[in-house]
């Protein structure tokens, strides 16, 4: 039955209909009508007050990546909206479904440079999957429904809805259009492969002598991990993972070689270069994955499946390029895929892996030196590894990727495409709220942590238990690594002062410890796990000039890795 | 047509007739670093749908990338590369030319006889010539008028349509999905 309600009520009623449990946001002038209505809906929606809008977007993103559901953030016009930008771009690059609701100045003053006016739909046009400015309250319901549908379907991504203050205040006779279909004639995510494509792909798979599966984020977003595993196991095809593909197949599975790309496992990169067939599933051949495109996997046929048609043939030309839903397409493949062994090929990969094992530092005696690699691997070991981890970008992120194996999908949350410093802590808070029964570890650097550090207060205010592990090397570590390798150790602006993180934590009422040697790690992990309903901070003071190996220098051939020397080399 | 040789492609897009669509389209070109040769937008016989003709000077592979990226835009309903088959294309130009002596007026008349062009305004100092033709013919006409002395010019950009019963419509149909076997 229709009733007279305001635009603000319509926004919140629509969010409830979409199953929204949380809004991460920050109030302000033009979004005030919606905040005024918010307490009425507190049995359905819990609002979390962040300390900076960037973190609101990251929290919504972390929630979305951990749950597969749409995360929601809210901000006022002008600076509130512009502060969201980095978080929106992060979600866009990693195909994370979030909906951002921003207040806008009232319609009569749009375009007059009014107080806190910004053309936020203009600003976010290139970094959203789609965005809206709602100029008529009669379009509001339809717009919010479309926003959620677009955010979560096809290749997911951020959608922004900008709503003028007077639209939020206006009242209309309203009821929710329960059974009305969403009408978007121009939005048709692809579904299946043609029978010709299936035939060609299956023939390539059955004939291949040296095949490799490149498993990406899309496998998890498309719920196709079981199908991919069946394909790999039946035909005994080794699997390399992208950074965001970690968890798509369990690391530790005999067919899973490890991460590919710039800091990937050497065996993955060599295997890609020598393969005669790449089966790329839900990944986009990012430059961090391919290195020099001209010499990338030169002798292989390529099957590329992705839900986004514009990814096919974007960076790497596909012999069979299929824009489709991975689960549907793999199910089309599977009946034709024959059992296989690929013993010789897998044996060759084992040799590369053994060579890497000889170079491993984890078990070397490093004296009193505490390494980031050891810290992260020990956290994995002492927690049992069955956690959700989040990271910022940089050395600690690559070390996490190398030394923290993930067995389940959607347990590794990292800013891969945009490479956003400061992502780890807010993403962890979002992930923990979305998956309260999971243990969540934010593994961050001293640089990135200081970018979104104020969110400690948010975590305390909300009683969110995440464990923050600062890998503190006193440098912007990855930039320092590049300076060492490519700029003659000219450490321009990378050494960094940090506050006493333990005292800082105390100021927030957060239990904290500083760890300086490897024998303290197990105890610190036990301590962190014993704390409930409040964050814990562990600061690991590590070797300043640790290197992340192997490394493919930017633009170099994928097989031309800088390797860690073997002992005695 | 060779995959990697630059060539002119007339890409036609049906879009929802709503604010901001043109910005979304042009932004995509800038974001993906594709160049637009010409772009024209106008209404269609359906009030809810506009039609764009975007001419690019690029490889066929790039034309596919552009089409896939266009189709990713939510308000873009349908996309086709009409120059991949028989089609009709037209460009319209208004060219203001010097006409302040008998010789120039005589030359103008001769040019208009040889091209699908006509004089639509003439005064003691200048005349306006209108030409509607294929782009190359418009270019040739402009080159000749330039000898008389062009003082001002405006062009609409190319509009194009496939010939015969190949009809680009907003009904749900095959998406131009590149599949590694470019036709």
Image (cartoon, coloured by chain):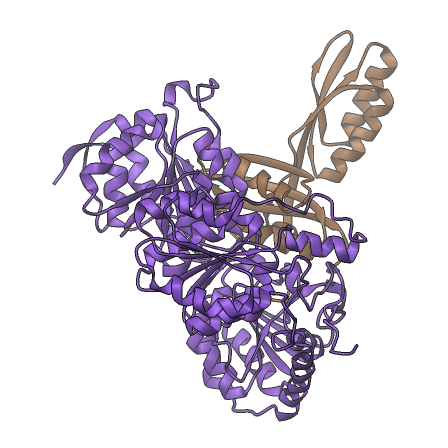
Most extreme residue toward the left is A1
Q: Colour of chain A?
A: purple
Residue A71 coordinates in the image, percent (x, y): 37, 50
The residue at 72%/54% (across/down) is B59
Residue A74 coordinates in the image, percent (x, y): 37, 39
B92 lies above or below A569: above
Left or right placement of residue A413 versus residue A298 in this view: left
Task: Answer whether residue A410 is visible to the viewer in this image.
Answer: no
Left or right placement of residue A394 versus residue A42 in this view: right
Tell me the quadrant of the picture where the C terminus of chain B can be found.
bottom right
Task: Answer whether residue A396 is visible to the viewer in this image.
Answer: yes
Q: Colour of chain B?
A: brown
Tell me the quadrant of the picture where the N terminus of chain B can be found.
bottom right
Residue A565 coordinates in the image, percent (x, y): 75, 74
The residue at 64%/71% (across/down) is A319
- Is residue B72 or residue A7 the one in the foreground? A7
Residue A375 coordinates in the image, percent (x, y): 54, 66
A522 lies above or below B146: below
- Is residue B100 or residue A131 the one in the foreground? A131
Left or right placement of residue A476 versus residue A256 in this view: right
């Amino acid at each position: 039955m229709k009733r007279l309600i305001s635009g603000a009520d319509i926004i919140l009623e629509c969010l409830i209909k979409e199953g929204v449990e949380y809004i991460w946001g920050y109030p302000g002038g033009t979004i005030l009508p919606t905040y005024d209505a918010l307490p009425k809906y507190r049995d359905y929606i819990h609002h979390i007050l962040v300390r900076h809008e960037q973190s609101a977007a990251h929290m919504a993103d972390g929630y979305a990546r951990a749950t597969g559901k749409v995360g929601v953030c809210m901000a006022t016009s002008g600076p509130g909206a512009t502060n969201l930008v980095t978080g929106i771009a992060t979600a866009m690059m990693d195909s994370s479904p979030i909906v951002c609701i921003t207040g806008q100045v009232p319609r009569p003053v749009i375009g007059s440079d009014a107080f806190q006016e910004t053309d936020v739909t203009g600003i976010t046009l290139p970094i959203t999957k789609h965005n809206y400015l709602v100029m008529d309250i009669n379009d509001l319901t339809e717009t919010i429904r479309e926003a959620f549908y677009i955010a979560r379907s096809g290749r997911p991504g951020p959608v922004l809805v900008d709503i003028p203050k007077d639209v939020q205040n206006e009242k209309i006779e309203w009821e929710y259009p329960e059974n009305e279909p969403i009408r978007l004639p121009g939005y048709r995510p692809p579904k299946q492969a043609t029978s010709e494509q299936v035939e060609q792909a299956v023939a390539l798979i059955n004939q291949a002598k040296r095949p490799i599966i490149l498993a990406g984020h899309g496998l998890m977003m498309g719920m196709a991990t079981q199908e991919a595993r069946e394909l790999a196991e039946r035909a005994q095809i080794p699997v390399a993972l992208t950074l965001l593909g970690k968890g798509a197949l369990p690391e530790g599975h005999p067919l899973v070689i490890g991460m590919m790309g710039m800091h990937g496992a050497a065996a993955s990169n060599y295997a890609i270069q020598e393969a005669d067939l790449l089966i790329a599933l839900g990944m986009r051949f990012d430059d961090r994955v391919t290195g020099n495109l001209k010499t990338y996997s030169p002798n292989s046929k390529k099957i590329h499946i992705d839900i986004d048609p514009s990814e096919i043939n974007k960076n790497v030309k596909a012999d069979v390029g299929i824009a489709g839903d991975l689960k549907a397409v793999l199910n089309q493949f599977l009946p034709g895929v024959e059992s296989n062994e690929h013993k010789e090929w897998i044996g060759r990969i084992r040799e590369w892996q053994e060579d890497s094992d000889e170079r491993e530092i984890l078990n070397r005696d490093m004296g009193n030196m505490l390494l980031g690699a050891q810290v992260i691997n020990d956290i994995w070991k002492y927690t049992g590894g069955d956690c959700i981890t989040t990271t910022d970008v940089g050395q600690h992120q690559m070390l996490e990727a190398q030394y923290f194996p993930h067995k389940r999908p959607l347990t590794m949350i990292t800013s891969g495409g945009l490479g956003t410093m400061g992502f780890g802590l807010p993403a962890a808070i979002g992930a923990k709220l979305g998956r309260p029964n999971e243990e969540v570890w934010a593994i961050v650097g001293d640089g990135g942590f200081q970018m979104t550090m104020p969110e400690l207060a948010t975590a305390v205010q909300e009683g969110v238990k995440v464990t923050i592990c600062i890998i503190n090397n006193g440098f912007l570590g990855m930039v320092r690594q590049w300076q060492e390798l490519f700029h003659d150790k000219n450490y321009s602006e990378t050494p960094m002062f940090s506050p006493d993180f333990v005292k800082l934590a105390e100021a927030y009422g957060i239990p904290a410890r500083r760890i300086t040697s490897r024998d303290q790690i197990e105890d610190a992990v036990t301590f962190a796990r014993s704390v409930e309903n409040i964050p814990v901070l562990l600061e690991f003071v590590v070797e300043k000039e640790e290197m992340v190996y192997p490394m493919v220098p930017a633009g170099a051939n994928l097989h031309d890795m800088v390797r860690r020397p073997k002992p005695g080399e | 047509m060779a995959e990697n040789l630059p060539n002119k492609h007339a890409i036609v897009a049906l879009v929802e007739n709503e604010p901001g669509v043109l910005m979304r389209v042009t932004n995509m070109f800038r974001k993906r670093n594709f160049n637009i040769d010409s772009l024209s937008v106008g209404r269609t016989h359906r009030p809810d749908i506009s039609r764009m003709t975007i001419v690019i000077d690029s490889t066929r592979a790039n034309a596919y990338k552009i089409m896939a990226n266009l189709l990713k835009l939510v308000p873009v309903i349908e996309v086709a590369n009409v120059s991949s088959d028989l089609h009709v294309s037209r460009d319209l130009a208004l060219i203001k030319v010097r006409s302040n002596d008998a010789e120039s007026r005589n030359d103008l008349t001769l040019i208009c006889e040889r091209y699908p062009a006509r004089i639509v305004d003439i005064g003691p100092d200048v005349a306006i010539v209108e030409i509607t033709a294929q782009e190359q013919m418009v270019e040739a006409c402009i080159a000749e008028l330039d000898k008389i002395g062009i003082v001002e010019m405006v062009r609409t950009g190319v509009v194009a349509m496939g010939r015969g019963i190949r009809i680009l419509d907003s009904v749900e149909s095959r998406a131009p999905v590149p599949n590694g076997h470019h036709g």
